[in-house]
Image (cartoon, rainbow, N blue to C red):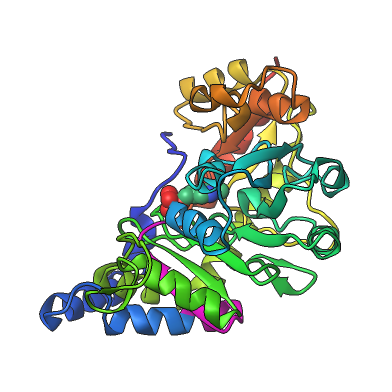
């Protein structure tokens, strides 16, 4: 059996007629960027998250970059970020000239709240928290620290559409919830797209200006903006998928539960779930001390897996100038050496999954 790590066309086929109808509606409308579909999607996504405002953007990275910029964070400022996140979270900081200060992850792959306070200095302006692999971070503790030290809280929700902590949705704890709708995300478009959600009217207004060359009124450029507009096609297709979000996330939870119950190999460490936290299983990430050999065996059995992520940002070549070295963040580095993302996608059949589980259980290092 051949199993890919991620399959995108099955979710298209599931709702094919709705997608096609939405696409045709846009093609025939004569209006293709920032129009009624974007407006409606923004309204519906704000409602989905329970926030007052949503601003559609070009990508998740733009949501992060513009959030930091709109808060006035730049040169000389520090932003706290977890050491095992995707490079985009860190780029959101460094694209503004600010300095990322890394904090080790906890046993759930999220920011270790117990290590944040020792990273705070008098230059710290914000905490950027990523709800990695779909699981909500320790938001009671993190929100309390942000309030105590008067730090802005920015959430990277690129992997956590719809995941809650203590009954509250990720993206609603800080001033800005940053979302990516890249095709592989739980709420994925058919191209690049992103958004921020917020309850702060002035913040939303600034982001809205920034995304369209810094203007509210065309050709009246109040600030130096960018082009980060969301197009009508992506917005219309996202509206279709958003309507099925609960079912799509539930399906992933069912698949995750089957992995948790099915994998019994003691050499493979299963992901845990924090008390009070929900995961929408953007990735199902196991740990294995002999990952290379496990991955190779799976590959030979026709099972594709991925590593999220093999090099932690502090050791990335592009950040050599920050002066970090191997050993600075040992937990993040261990995860980089041991994590393996198993196949999990919309439309994955139990037969496909059972084949993966069987191979995992038969393997010995
Ligand atoms: C995907 C992702 C991003 C970036 O989103 P893009 O839409 O690809 O720019 C940021 N942070 C995390 C954690 C992601 O997984």
Residue 291 falls left or right of residue 55 = right
Please tell me whether residue 15 is drawn above or below residue 42 in the rendered image.
above
Residue 340 lies in magenta, yes or no?
A: no
Q: Which of 290 and 52 is in front in this view?
A: 52
**Viewport quadrant of the N terminus:** top left
Residue 348 visible in image: no
User: Residue 184: percent from the left, percent from the top?
Assistant: 43, 51
User: Residue 206: percent from the left, percent from the top?
Assistant: 46, 72
User: Residue 47: percent from the left, percent from the top?
Assistant: 54, 84
Q: Which of 161 and 123 is in front in this view?
A: 123
User: Residue 5: percent from the left, percent from the top?
Assistant: 47, 39
**Viewport quadrant of the C terminus:** top right
* Magenta-highlighted residues: 45-59
Q: Which of 266 and 178 is in front in this view?
A: 178
Please tell me whether residue 69 is drawn above or below residue 44 in the rendered image.
above
Please tell me whether residue 230 is drawn above or below residue 113 in the rendered image.
below
Q: Nearer the viewer, residue 235 or 253?
A: 235
Name which quarter of the figure residue 73 lies in: bottom right
The residue shown at (19%, 81%) is 25
- How many numbered circles are shown? 0
The residue shown at (76%, 36%) is 104
Residue 124 falls left or right of residue 285 = right
The residue shown at (80%, 28%) is 266
The residue shown at (69%, 25%) is 333
Residue 18 visible in image: yes
Name which quarter of the figure residue 13 lies in: bottom left
């Amino acid at each position: 059996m051949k199993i890919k790590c991620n399959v995108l066309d099955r979710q298209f086929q599931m709702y094919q007629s709705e997608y096609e109808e939405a696409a045709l509606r846009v093609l025939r409308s004569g209006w293709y960027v920032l129009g009624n579909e974007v407006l409606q999607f923004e309204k519906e996504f704000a409602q989905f998250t329970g926030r007052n405002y949503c601003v559609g953007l070009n990508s998740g990275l733009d949501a992060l970059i513009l959030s930091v910029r709109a808060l006035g964070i730049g040169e000389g400022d520090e932003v706290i970020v977890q050491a095992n996140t995707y490079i985009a979270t860190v780029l959101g900081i460094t694209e503004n000239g600010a300095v990322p200060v890394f904090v080790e992850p906890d046993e759930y792959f999220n920011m270790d709240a117990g290590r944040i306070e020792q990273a705070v200095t008098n230059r710290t302006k914000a905490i950027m928290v990523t709800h990695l692999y779909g699981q909500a971070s320790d938001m009671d503790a993190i929100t309390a620290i942000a309030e105590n030290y008067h730090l802005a809280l920015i959430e990277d929700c690129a992997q956590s559409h719809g995941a809650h902590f203590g009954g509250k949705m990720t993206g609603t704890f800080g001033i800005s919830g940053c979302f990516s709708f890249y095709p592989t995300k739980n709420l994925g478009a058919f191209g690049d797209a992103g958004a921020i959600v917020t309850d702060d009217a002035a913040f939303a207004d600034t982001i809205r200006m920034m995304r369209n060359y810094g203007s509210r009124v065309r050709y009246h450029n109040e600030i130096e903006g960018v082009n980060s507009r969301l197009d009508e096609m992506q917005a219309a297709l996202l509206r279709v998928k958003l309507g099925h979000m609960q079912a799509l996330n539930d399906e992933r939870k069912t698949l995750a539960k089957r992995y948790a119950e099915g994998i019994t190999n003691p050499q493979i460490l299963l992901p845990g779930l924090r008390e009070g936290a929900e995961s929408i299983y953007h990735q199902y990430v196991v740990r294995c001390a002999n990952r290379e050999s496990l991955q190779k065996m799976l590959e030979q059995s026709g099972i594709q897996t991925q590593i999220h992520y093999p090099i932690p940002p502090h050791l990335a070549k592009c950040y050599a100038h920050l002066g970090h070295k191997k050993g600075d963040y040992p937990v993040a580095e261990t995860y980089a050496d041991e994590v393996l993302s198993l196949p999990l996608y919309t439309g994955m059949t139990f037969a496909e999954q059972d084949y993966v589980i069987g191979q995992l259980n038969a393997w010995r290092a």
